[in-house]
Image (tube, rainbow, N blue to C red):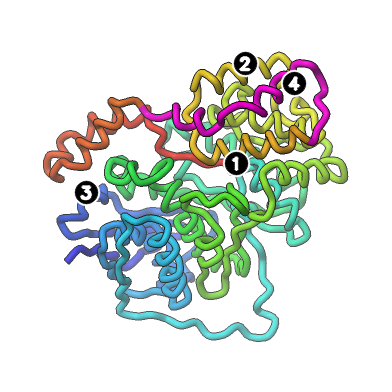
Amino acid sequence: MSAIIIDRPTVDGRTLECEARATPDLERFLTGEPFRTEYDVPIAEVPEEILAIPVLAQVCPVAWANGADVYVEAVDATFARALEDVKETLCGMYDFLEGGTLYARRTIDPDPPADGEGDGESGLLFTGGVDSTCSYVRHREESPTLISIRGWTITPDPADDESWRHLTDRVESFATERGLETAFLESNMLSFLDHPMLLAHYKRHVDGAWYSSVGHGLGLLGLCAPLAHARGMTNLYVAATHWEGIDLEWGSRPDIDDNVRWAGTRCHHDCYELTRQERLDAIADYVASDAPGLELQTCNVRMDGNCGRCEKCYRTAVGLRLAGLEPTEHGYPFADHEYERLRVALESGEWVLGQDERYMWEDIRGRARETESESATERAFFEWLETADLAELVSESGPPLSHRLLHAGARNAPSSVYNRLYPAWATAKTGLRLVRSDR
């Protein structure tokens, strides 16, 4: 029977570590590296059933993709029920997911909160992008702790140290200006699971990569469980990428994130009722009332500011203009002549675009119809956008044939063969779109 066995977690000060083992048919999806997450608060007093949540949040979707069961010593009963709800959503969203059962020696039901204990602190997963900044604007009266995670778009690899420093410096500055607390955690969830192998097996089923398309809503929120327990957070917010009316297969949605919960904490998929352009409108109102010098960070290329040349930078700059803000005043080097380059890049397939980018450009197109252009160049771009076949722009983007062949080869290779070929695969994978985030 296919299974993943989770050993009892151990804690050393602020570091959580846990071993996971799998039956031979699932070994290829684990690298053999222990799961590890480092927090910036002591977690020695966090109970075992909460300490198990971060690793369960990573491995359960892998088990469900293979019809496998998961075994753990102790689990929080509230989280066990949450996993059932999330599993139902993911299995309904993807035909290749088969489901599985979680078995625990001890399922621990927490005592109900005493009067007055239900209103603790709030936490917000935060990068400084459009979505998380809008979520902060909406919940700023709660003074949420801003939580940033190293392990997905910024990996624990030393090569990413500078990027992580840029992010933490930016978040600390944002928090200091507003009297907020911050929380930073680092995890090896992308190297604990063999994401190249997951991509090789399941890329053909998803628009994006494993973590973005399947795992990141449950995975990122689950990582925060020991932190939330240690800090007394009763509400944890994660900003929506998409919005009502977009029914994409994506790893973070209301019917995933709103179901994630554990003793004392509920998670919330935030701002889903707002389109991306409406989120920029909310930010524009906040700029006008409280933060005239606010800068956003959304770049796909760098973390020490915005390059102004990638698709995401262009998309954000255009959206800022449509919200009545000047991009150059909020972190984006953008001038009228950039509209022509943007059009050429979109038409030529310079960027690999997914269905989410299609909907975001459609959102911009809708707003442009209601907005008077500031220049002839801008007007010409929006006239082109009005007639552009955005679905065709997406369909013409995609990974090269060589990468698709690598997927197929890795997918069909026995584990013993794959392990010998892994160094070559790891080198080739650097050209693949392994992670996507629009927060």
Q: Which residues are magenta?
A: 370-399
Q: Give the residue furthest to the front.
A: 387
Q: Find out whether residue 392 is within the magenta segment.
A: yes
Quadrant where the N terminus is found in the figure: bottom left
Give the residue number, with chain letter if any, for mark 3.
28
Give the residue number, with chain letter if any, for mark 1.
168
* Residue type, numbered disc 2: Arg
Find numbered disc 4 in the image and state the secondary structure of the residue it sits on. Answer: helix
Q: What is the spatial separation of the Cα atoms under label 3 and label 2, in whole angstroms?
A: 44 Å
Dot in front, 4 or 2: 4
Q: Is residue 349 above or below residue 60?
A: above
Report x, y in % for residue 295: 72, 35
* Residue type, numbered disc 4: Glu
Report x, y in % for residue 408: 23, 37
Crowding near pointer 3: few (<14 within 10 Å), some, many (20+)? many
Find numbered disc 1 in the image and state the secondary structure of the residue it sits on. Answer: helix
Q: Quadrant of residue 320?
A: top right
Which label's residue is closer to the chain start, 3 or 1? 3
Dominant secondary structure, magenta: helix
Dot in front, 1 or 2: 2
